[in-house]
Amino acid sequence: MKLFSGNSNRVLADSIAQYLEIPLGQAMVRRFADQEVFVEIKENVRGEDVFIVQSTSYPANDHLMELLIMIDAMRRASARRITAVLPYFGYARQDRKAGGRTPISAKLVANIITEAGADRVMTLDLHAGQIQGFFDIPTDNLFAVPLLARDVKGHQDLDDLMVVSPDVGGVVRARSLAKRLDAPLAIVDKRRDRPGESEVMNIIGDVTGRNCILIDDIIDSGGTLCNAADALMRAGANSASAYITHGVLSGGAVTRISASSLKELVITDSIQPTKAVLEAPNIRVITTANLLGEAIQRTASEESVSSLFD
């Protein structure tokens, strides 16, 4: 087994390598003057089981091209099996036709990764479960809920705890966390008038005096989450914290979160946190290195991955 990394999240790749107790593979991933991506694998991978860690986060297109070219380089170097490990799968929100004459970009990206030569894909908390079916190769969609549940138990006030889904679409994820914490569930019902903007309408469930934990897979602009937290506090909640797997946090999201009524936002390192995120007073980052490392180890040794979440 050999582990390699592109430039999107080198810190996470190093942590995974430490968990696996193997060195991170030597690969040069750089740009020509015109920004073309060039990859050179600096060690022998012939007949090896290769894992490439690369989140397709901002800049998504650059990181996607790095991944594709690394896969092609491994294939031409006669690697026995190539697994693309995408802690964050970009383009996942484009998983259906949202209107006339629009693409299903998640399917296109899945096709490109397959055609580049990947033998299997490993990712974390896909935005929509059906994206697994977009790939014609084995795909493992890992779940962060067990990791988040452990952190809640270790860092949050468990008295009067209530798990809250920030929208109807996230109820399954919220119910899974609520079951692990033996906590009741509430739902924020919202109406979105324009992309990137949301208006909270009402809350399904009594949150009066509750310590609320919002859970979702992606936080981008932060508008939905801040509106949900404000609505919970207006409804009488004692506090509102949030657990999100993928901290995209684009634009002024960090400033918005810092000034919001959120007691704490906890995100994972599936996307490498920026300096602003690390310095924010109410944002905390937890690592997915052990989860991904164990999944990689089990894949390499042909053991069950799904049993990680039993």
Image (cartoon, rainbow, N blue to C red):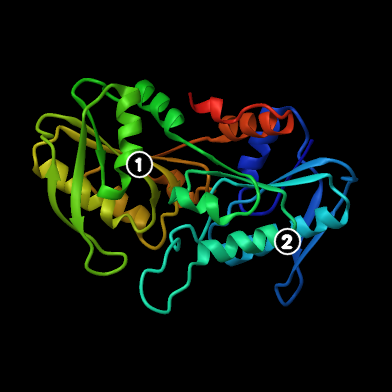
Q: Secondary structure at mark 2?
A: helix
Amino acid type, label 2 = Ala
Is 79 on the left or on the right of 300, as rendered? Answer: right
Q: For this rendering, which residue is in front, 124 or 239?
A: 124
The residue at the point 77 percent across, 31 percent down is 22
Distance Cα–Cα, label 1 vs label 2: 42 Å
Measured from the top left, where is residue 113 in percent x and y? 66, 59
Secondary element at tag 1: loop
Q: Residues within 10 Å of mark 1 (few under 14, many from 20)?
A: some
Answer with left or right where residue 299 lies relative to residue 130. right
Q: Is residue 96 above or below residue 228?
A: below
Reading the image, the residue beneath label 2 is: 116
Q: Say which of 179 and 234 sits in front.
A: 179
Give the residue displayed 13% in from the left and 37% down from the top: 205
Q: Nearer the viewer, residue 2 or 26?
A: 2
Q: Amino acid at mark 1?
A: Pro
Q: Which residue is mark 1?
A: 281
